[in-house]
Image (cartoon, rainbow, N blue to C red):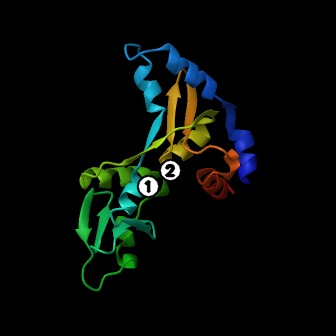
Amino acid sequence: MEAKELVSKEVLANASLMIGETARAIDDSNAWYGELMALCSSSDYETTLSDNGWEVKEGCLVNEGDREYWDPDDEEVYDIEEGETVADIVDIAVMAECDRHESMEGLCRYLDLEPYTQDVYEHWIVSDRLAEKLKARGEVVKDFMNLTIWGRTTTGQAIAMDGVIEAIAQETA
């Protein structure tokens, strides 16, 4: 599926004005305040890990400099033994694509790394199907006022040009 086609089918409406006006109208005593604030920023686990020597190789989180890998099932860091390569640990430590964000979050917690924060610039109402795929990639997606809202952390270009949308479109093809 082309990214433009994905956007036309799965991105339903711009909700930025609604979120902005709601944010101005309520304070922290309102029941929706916490949910609204959760739509305003995102934790960037991937960049945090990358800056600390970790990268995704063959579906595994690996720190080649320190010769370590993350086992998402055990939620433990293990040493890569002498003579072992990433290919040798793939069966043990490979992350399912749907668990990638959770694995990175778990490794940051394990290493006691505070993730970088990304600001959300736009809010969009999206289909539940797209919402699940966005969540799996660490995007901000929340149910708010019975709507599924995607907090977009990029702006100034067509949604179809976002890397996350292009990746989902390729996966869906």
Q: In the drawing, what numbered circle is on residue 100?
A: 1
Residue 52 in percent (x, y) is at 33, 62
Mark 1 touches mark 2? (CB < 8 Å): yes
Residue 148 versus residue 32: which sits nearer the camera?
Answer: 32
N-term mark: 1 or 2: 1
Q: In the drawing, what numbered circle is on residue 137?
A: 2
Give, as a three-letter code, the residue at label 2: Arg
How crowded pointer 1 is (Cα within 10 Å; few <14, some 14-19, many 20+) is rated as many
Instruction: Examine the rendered structure and indicate whether residue 31 appears above or below residue 152.
Output: above
State the quadrant of the N terminus.
Answer: bottom right
Residue 77 in percent (x, y) is at 25, 63
User: What residue is shown at x 45% (from left), y 58% (from top)?
Assistant: 96
How crowded pointer 2 is (Cα within 10 Å; few <14, some 14-19, many 20+) is rated as some
User: What residue is shown at x 61% (from left), y 56% (from top)?
Assistant: 167
Residue 21 in percent (x, y) is at 57, 19
Q: Please state the total of marks drawn on the protein image.
A: 2
User: What residue is shown at x 25% (from left), y 56% (from top)?
Assistant: 111
Residue 12: quarter of image = top right
Instruction: Examine the rendered structure and indicate whether residue 80 appears above or below residue 99.
Output: below
Residue 73 versus residue 121: which sits nearer the camera?
Answer: 121
Image side of residue 16 versus residue 107, left or right: right
Residue 78: quarter of image = bottom left
As helix, strand or loop, the secondary structure at mark 2 comes to loop
As helix, strand or loop, the secondary structure at mark 1 comes to helix
User: What residue is shown at x 45% (from left), y 41% (from top)?
Assistant: 42
Give, as a three-letter code, the residue at label 1: Arg
